[in-house]
Image (cartoon, helix red, strand yellow):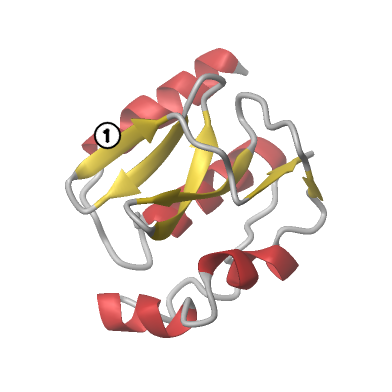
Amino acid sequence: MAAGLNAFVAAGAALPWIWGGTDCTAWMSDWCRLHWGHDPIADLRGTYDTEAGADALIAGGLTELLRPRMAPLRITPAPVAGDVGVIRILGQETAAICTGKAWAFRTLRGLGEAPARPIIAWSK
């Protein structure tokens, strides 16, 4: 899995930011779909394409938006490489992928990676 995760994260660095396509939540959900066959935002794809549209969806918080959509995954208190979660970066909730030592996430400027304590994390 490490090779697949590393390749996915590396490819994420080259993606342009597209609201609803390659934003932080869509990118993390693409990993879920590829890795586990589950797309947490399948019902949201194509419903927003602007920052305002994304903000409207996450008005109650990204964690609360994702929580009911993550089944069949389980909440994990000890995420490992390949698990996904929501972390806080510069005061904002961000969907991210655990790389083992840090969390990878998409930003408007590309890919970020930082050690963080997840707000919530999911695993298979």
Q: Nearer the viewer, residue 15 or 103?
A: 103
The residue located at (31%, 36%) in the rendering is: 112
The residue located at (69%, 52%) in the rendering is: 38
Residue 95 in sight: yes
The residue located at (64%, 35%) in the rendering is: 83
Tell me: residue 56, above or below residue 2: below
The secondary structure type at the circle numbered 1 is helix
Q: Position of residue 74 (x, y in %)?
A: 82, 48
Q: Amino acid at mark 1?
A: Ala
Q: Is residue 26 left or right of residue 13?
A: right
Total marks drawn?
Answer: 1
Classify mark 1: residues with Cα within 10 Å, few (<14), some (14-19) or many (20+). some
Picture quarter with the N terminus: top right
Q: Is residue 123 left or right of residue 107?
A: right
Residue 7 placement: quadrant:
top left
The residue located at (78%, 48%) in the rendering is: 75
Disc 1 designates what residue?
13
Q: Is residue 112 left or right of residue 109?
A: right
Q: Position of residue 51 (x, y in %)?
A: 27, 75
Picture quarter with the C terminus: top right
Tell me: residue 16, above or below residue 97: below
Tell me: residue 20, above or below residue 86: below
Q: Nearer the viewer, residue 69 or 3?
A: 69
Q: Position of residue 98 (x, y in %)?
A: 55, 32
Q: Residue furthest left?
A: 109
